Amino acid sequence: MTLSDIDRIIEMAWEDRTPFEAIEIQFGLSENEVIKLMRTELKRSSFNLWRKRINSGVSQKHMHKRNDGINRFRCSLQRTISMNKISKR
């Protein structure tokens, strides 16, 4: 895995609206593998903050916890992303 892939996975993991399933589709990493990656790549305090946020009710990282009205992985204003490559408009 390249450094840019790791950076993108961390970025997606921090985003509240990006579910673990989206990370698995793009990178093939399960939720447990993402947690292991975050544990090794982040400082302990940052990892603890991330885990606290994920386990709180604020984050919607799990598809089964999401509101049924949310049927997308990204904001409608965000640029199109296809297989982790940003498409030009």
Image (cartoon, rainbow, N blue to C red):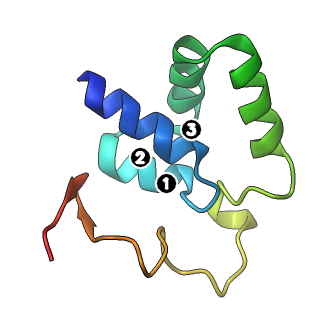
Return the residue nearer the eye: 14 or 31.
14
Say which amino acid is labelled 3: Glu
Instruction: Work out which quarter of the rendered image holds the N terminus and state it.
Output: top left
Q: Secondary structure at mark 1?
A: helix
- Residue 48 falls in image quadrant: top right
Residue visible at 56% across and 56% down in the picture: 19
Return the residue nearer the eye: 17 or 19.
17
Name the residue carrying label 2.
24
- Residue 55 falls in image quadrant: top right
Is residue 40 in view? yes
> Does residue 5 sit above or below 19 in this rendering?
above
User: What x and y, as percent, mark residue 31?
Assistant: 56, 38
Residue visible at 55% across and 42% down in the picture: 13
Is residue 1 in view? no
Structural distance between the alpha carbons of marks 1 and 3: 8 Å
Badge 1 or badge 3: first in the primary sequence? 1
User: What x and y, as percent, mark residue 29?
Assistant: 42, 36
What crowding class fits label 3: few (fewer than 14 Cα within 10 Å), some (14-19), or many (20 or more)? Answer: some
User: What x and y, as percent, mark residue 75?
Assistant: 49, 74
Q: In the picture provided, is 69 more to the left or to the right than 65?
A: left
Say which amino acid is labelled 2: Glu
Mark 1 near mark 2, Cβ–Cβ under 8 Å?
A: yes
User: What x and y, as percent, mark residue 56?
Assistant: 86, 48
> Does residue 8 sit above or below 3 in this rendering?
below
Q: In the picture provided, is 63 more to the left or to the right than 10?
A: right
- Residue 36 falls in image quadrant: top right
Name the residue carrying label 3.
31
Instruction: Work out which quarter of the rendered image holds the C terminus and state it.
Output: bottom left
Name the residue carrying label 1.
21
Residue farthest along the left direction in this orientation: 88
